Image (cartoon, rainbow, N blue to C red):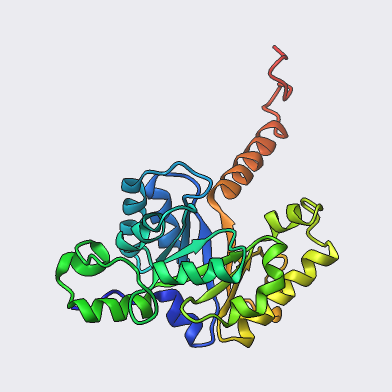
C-alpha cells in the first residue's frame, strides 16, 4: 500500500497546467463543492484564518473523495506548524514570506525526509497510512508526492532569488503580488513596473532551475501568466464568488418592479 499520488504534481511534471481555488469559508462542504466542480487543487489557509485542525482534516477528506489535492498555507513558526498539515494528508504546503536563501534552506530541512532533510518522522497519521506504509517507502513517497511551495511576496528575497530557485528539496516558487505591492510602497498597483518585473523574474528563475512557477490570477490574465511560464495558478476564491452572486441577485431584485409598485421599500 502506497501514498496517494499528487494530482497537481502529475499534471505539472507532464508539462500541463494545474488549477487551484482558494477556500476561505471553514465549512468542509465548500471544499467538497469546489472539488466536485473539478479544480485540481484547493487552497486552505492558516496564515490569515483561525481554522482548527479538525476543520482542515475534514476539508482534506472532502477533497480526497473527489481526487483533488489540498494545499495548506501554513503559519510561520516551529516545525510542527509545517508538518502537521502534511501528516493530515494535505498534498502540499505553501510557506509564506520566504525571505532569504538561509530561510529556504531551513524550511527544506524541516519539511523533507532523509536524504533531503530531517523532517521529524512519525508515520502514524493519515499520510503514513496510520503505520500501514513501509517506513522507507513512506519517506520516499512523501518526498516525491507531497509538494512544498515557497511564497515570494517581498522585495527582500529578490536579491537571492536565483540561489533560492536553485536550492534542491522543494517544488514551486509562488509569486504573491499583494504583499509584494505593499513591500515596494505601491499597495494594490498591480501594473507597477517593479511588481510586473518581479512576476516575470520569479517565473523565469523557477523554470531555469527546474522548479514550477505558481501565482494568483484570474480569467483576465490567465493567458499572460501561462505565456510567462506559470503552470500552477489560483484562479478565484469562494468569498469572491459568493459576494459577486449576492450582488447580482440584489441588483436584479432592486431593478425589477412588481406590477403596480415601485422598487423602493419606502413606498406603500
Q: Decide if residue 223 is in sight here.
A: no
Which x, y percent locates residue 171? 50, 77
Q: Decide if residue 80 is in sight here.
A: yes
Q: Left or right of 94: which side holds 130?
A: left
The residue lying at 70 percent from left, 31 percent from top is 254
Q: Left or right of 4: which side holds 9?
A: right
Residue nearest the viewer, comparing 128 with 250: 128
Q: Left or right of 268: which side holds 211?
A: left
Q: Quadrant of the N terminus?
A: bottom left
The residue lying at 39 percent from left, 80 percent from top is 116
Furthest toward the right, the residue is: 193
Residue nearest the viewer, comparing 89 with 248: 89
Residue 258 lies in quadrant? top right
Q: Quadrant of the C terminus?
A: top right
The residue lying at 79 percent from left, 72 percent from top is 197
Which x, y percent locates residue 213? 60, 76
Amino acid at each position: 500500500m502506497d501514498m496517494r499520488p499528487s494530482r497537481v504534481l502529475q499534471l505539472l511534471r507532464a508539462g500541463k497546467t494545474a488549477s487551484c481555488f482558494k477556500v476561505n469559508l471553514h465549512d468542509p462542504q465548500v471544499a467538497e463543492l469546489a472539488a466536485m466542480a473539478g479544480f485540481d487543487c484547493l487552497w486552505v489557509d492558516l496564515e490569515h484564518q483561525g481554522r482548527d485542525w479538525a476543520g482542515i482534516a475534514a476539508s482534506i477528506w472532502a477533497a480526497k473523495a473527489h481526487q483533488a489535492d489540498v494545499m495548506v498555507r501554513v503559519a510561520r513558526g516551529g516545525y510542527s506548524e509545517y508538518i502537521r498539515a502534511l501528516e493530515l494528508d494535505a498534498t502540499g504546503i505553501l510557506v509564506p514570506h520566504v525571505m532569504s536563501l538561509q530561510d529556504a534552506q531551513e524550511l527544506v530541512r524541516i519539511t523533507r525526509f532523509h536524504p533531503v532533510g530531517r523532517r521529524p518522522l512519525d508515520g502514524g497519521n493519515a499520510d503514513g497510512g496510520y503505520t500501514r506504509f513501509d517506513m522507507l517507502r513512506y519517506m520516499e513517497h512523501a518526498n516525491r508526492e507531497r509538494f512544498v511551495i515557497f511564497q515570494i511576496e517581498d522585495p527582500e528575497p529578490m536579491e537571492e532569488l536565483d540561489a533560492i530557485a536553485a536550492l534542491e528539496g522543494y517544488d514551486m516558487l509562488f509569486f504573491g503580488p499583494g504583499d509584494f505591492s505593499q513591500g515596494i510602497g505601491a499597495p494594490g498597483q498591480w501594473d507597477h513596473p517593479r511588481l510586473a518585473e518581479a512576476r516575470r523574474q520569479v517565473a523565469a528563475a523557477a523554470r531555469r532551475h527546474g522548479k514550477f512557477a505558481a501565482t494568483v490570477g484570474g480569467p483576465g490574465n490567465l493567458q499572460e501568466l501561462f505565456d510567462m511560464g506559470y503552470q500552477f495558478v489560483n484562479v478565484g476564491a469562494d468569498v469572491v464568488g459568493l459576494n459577486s452572486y449576492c450582488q447580482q441577485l440584489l441588483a436584479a431584485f432592486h431593478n425589477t418592479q412588481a406590477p403596480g409598485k415601485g422598487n423602493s421599500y419606502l413606498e406603500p
